[in-house]
Image: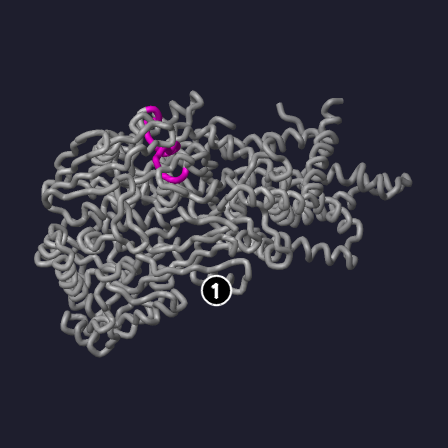
Amino acid sequence: MYKKLMLPFLMILLLVFATACSDDKSSDSSGKDGKEGKSDAEQTLKIANDQEPAGLDPHKTPAHSSVRIYSKIYEGLVTFDENMELVGQLASDWEQPDDKTYVFNLVEGVKFHNGREMTADDVKYSFERIMDEKTASHISSYFADIKSIEVMDDNTIKFELEEPNATFLTNLTNSSAAVVAKEVVEENEDLQQVAVGTGPFVFEKWVPDNSVTLIKNKDYHVKDTPKLDRLEYYTMKEEAARLSAIRTGEIDMTTLTSKSAGLLEKDDNVEIKDYQSLEYSYVGFNTENKPFNDEKVRQALSLATDRESIAKVVWDGKAIITGPITPAMGDWAIDVKDEELYMRNIEEAKKLLADAGYPDGFSTTITTASTYADMVDTAQLLQQQWAEIGVKAEIKQIEWGEYIDTWSNKTADILIGRNGSGTDPDRAMNYFFSTEGSANVWNFSDKDYDKLVEEGKRTIDQDERKEIYDKAQKELLELSPNLFLVSPESYVAVRKDVKGYTPRAHNAEDIDQTYKE
Amino acid sequence: MLIPVLFGVSLFIFFVMRVVPGDVAQTILGTDATPASLKQLRENFGLDLPLYQQYLNWMGGVLTGDFGESMRTGKAVLPDILNRFKLTFELTLIAAVISWIISIPLGIIAATKRNSKTDFSLRVVSLLGVSVPTFALATVLILILSLFFSYSPPVGYVGFFENPIKNLEIIILPAIVLGTSMAGAVMRMTRSSILEILRQDFIRTIRAKGAKEKVVIFQHALKNAMIPILTIIGLQIGTLLGGTVIIEQIFSLPGLGQLVLTAITQRDFVVVQGAVLFIAFIFVMINLLVDVLYSYLDPRISYK
């Protein structure tokens, strides 16, 4: 008997469900009106991101999807202003008694989001946590030069370095060099799920694979900042979904590729903001493997590469040709337009190949990540361009996790990728290309070059430093362990009613002064 | 059956995850990591232990209901899976209902009007349903709605019990997409299965007795035709409950599929293992349910 009743009962239940769904469709317009009315009273900014944050611990998480969120919650000692000049953040000012010592005076009365006052002890604790091996922090190498940290009083702290280091202050601007509260770390073991900082926004909740919500820090130590009451980040991996959501106003802001930026240009309610990014695309060679151990081969490939057509085809013309330091770094970058190796010259390339012992070219494999369309497109263009000098390249597309593995284990001959050139030339030069550089996955080693970049790191005088890096860049282009291709523009689509927002290469999501009309 | 299947799956996924190239520590720490911090992180995760020991540790936990903690977020895995499963379950259920509402009546109509124009056009439509991939349908739907109707589903997922109306507004579009694509197969199966039954002797007898066509179809033919239909539905539901990766991604839904996908790309072994084991369990349970329903539909089938 029960058995017989079961099926009809189930059917009725499902039908009720279905009716509920169809009812709901008619009510969505009223639901929406209510929502918009609310956002007028309360300033809420909704940002859609293409990746889910990988955790919130600033000392342990380098993923950009995390940084853009925790950089609103935490602060460091110093930061960059809009002109990329160093300014204090938690430090009101600082002095350098000698080349190896930095004394920071902290802003007084700064409170953590849990209400406790932040002191020099917290700064000391935070840097010790970064440097502690057990933390396994990704930025421990940034501060490997620190000899001692001394708390002089509640609001003064002294850092002593082993050697003079011109990158120390710029490394402090990194969002991961954040000041955290000891008791919160101890209570939660780590900070991946909780976040208690001193920044303009307070962490409210994280719904995995969906959203992170931050609310305004009413006790923020900078006056009248921030203007927004709520900041909601949504993970929307599908670009079509982000496009449709910004068109209809479901979200207020999102990053875009150059191709979709074109699609939104005609929309009256959306404004496209662009800026020159700090990223560049590259071709990396394993300089220990034949034939790439011969610099003539690498130079020949540089001569066979048409960078302009890469900018045109892969980035719709919205990219500029670059050396190892991108033009967005201002004066630090050298002008590469007139570099001999950047002028396409098939004859010369063939000659170089013949000199190296490959008069008929050779066969090779280009490895790239299928995750990023621009990398695959770049690989395909290079395949065509290099064919003209007899280099027959096969393209191997791999998934991102495997790509990172290939990268770090140096198992590819040629790798196509994108790097960030950082905010200090030391990163672009030392970190990727010095013999001991932790991201030198090219087996590249040149004593003169090493000397130059080490000197650059230890030279405090800016003009002298620039001269050194100019020289180092020229040398790197000549040796070509990587072929530096182009630096793309980045795009942010913003609803027209969002005001006070200007993206910049070193701080693309500076929304401290942003508000909605 | 349950135990050996789950044991096999657990062994399989555990070793597959270890064979797949890619290192969780490197994926987490990125390009700035030093060898020392990478080593430390691997130790923290117990990845330095011998494989058999890692497997035993994991299985020991699973048997006591502890699926471990995510390497990425440090969150307990099982509660997270169950939480995600709620959404996936709801989505599957609504999609299935939509698919039945469309497919079974249309399948019956096509069967009773065999070789007519109606039958022919319904068959074309069902073929479309089977062959248009869900991601294409979903993307086109999103584009049409936003371009011509200025509508896009609300962002920010809420559970059914928190805010049922908003929840359904979020779920309905993906459910329609999944439902229509499921409907094609079910409709074809309904049609052919009913046609086959209608050719049988007992139907002729019933018709000879003067029963109305309605009675013939609904009381006699449909119930007997349900077994193959149910098999297809069971398989479809089992697959959907395993997470509708693409649809969840396109509609930004935090379901089981997204959990697995993110975990795989980040090489979060613990989450992948736990989720795959859970999905296998659900699949086995759905098959069990389908078997039980068989014996309800056809009392001659019994399980002893």
Q: Can residue A133 be seen?
A: no
- Give percent across and percent down for residue B241: 55, 37
Please tell me which residue is depicted at 28% across the width and 64% down the height of the picture.
Answer: A485
**On the picture, is A382 further left or further right than B195?**
left
Prevailing secondary structure of the magenta residues: loop
- Above or below for A194 versus A286: above
Task: Please tell me whether mark 1 sits on a helix, a strand or a loop.
Answer: helix
Q: Nearer the viewer, residue A181 or A364?
A: A181
Please tell me which residue is depicted at 80% across the width and 52% down the height of the picture.
Answer: B113
Q: Identify the amino acid type marked 1.
A: Gly
- Give percent across and percent down for residue B123: 70, 55
**Is B287 a magenta residue?**
no
Query: Quadrant where the C terminus of chain B lies?
Result: top right
- Above or below for A121 versus B134: above
In magenta, the rendered stretch is A187-201
- Give percent across and percent down for residue B156: 53, 41
**Is A190 a magenta residue?**
yes
Write down the residue under mark 1. Answer: A262
